[in-house]
Image (cartoon, grey):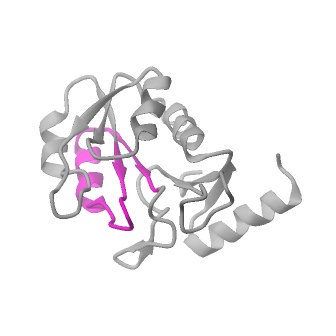
Amino acid sequence: NHGPLVAEFEKKLERYLGVKHCIAVANATIGLQLVIRGLGLSGEVIVPSFTFPATAHALAWEGVRPVFCDVDPGTHNIDPAEVERLITPQTSGIMGVHLWGNTCEVETLADIAKRHRLALMFDSAHAFACSHRGRMIGNFGQAEVFSFHATKFLNSAEGGAITTNDD
């Protein structure tokens, strides 16, 4: 908790990913919950139907209803056309999931979020060290959350990080 090695780790991640802010957390699920709270999400949030259970659990545990969206059969990522179809007056956000290093259609999702005044965040548990059109994952939406679980590319047995460029 705010120790010198954690602070050094956060700064190194900020530099590597090219983000303004990085906050280390106990695990990615808690990171998702913190971002959900920080963005003030409520009502419904659209998530891909193909994801790890923690993506939806984090929303449900924060009192937000996950609305499952079909995925693109080629990438297994959330289908932006289906996202737009699922938006209702209760929708407060979109949570994309970059899966297996395949990045979401971030520009399209950002456009949808902007047009509908929705928050946009990403579960980036499977995308550390990946990039999208020359920008490192960690720089998209209002925030992204990484996992450092033992099964991930960068692991610390457990742990995660929240990245954002939003002060």
Above-or-below relation of 2 to 4: above
Q: Is residue 78 left or right of residue 135?
A: left
Residue 100 falls inside the magenta stretch: yes
Above-or-below relation of 101 to 31: below
Instruction: Tell me the residue at 64%/73% (across/down).
Output: 15
Q: Is residue 98 left or right of residue 145?
A: left
Report the front residue among 140 and 122.
122
Residue bounds of the magenta highlight: 95-124
Residue placed furthest toward the right:
4
Above-or-below relation of 86 to 76: above
Residue 124 on image: x %, y %: 45, 56
Instruction: Tell me the residue at 42%/59% (across/down).
Output: 140
Residue 43 falls inside the magenta stretch: no
Instruction: Tell me the residue at 60%/58% (across/down).
Output: 150
Residue placed furthest toward the bottom:
134
Instruction: Tell me the residue at 58%/43% (across/down).
Output: 31
Q: Is residue 60 left or right of residue 164?
A: left
Residue 152 on image: x %, y %: 54, 62
Q: Is residue 37 left or right of residue 69?
A: right
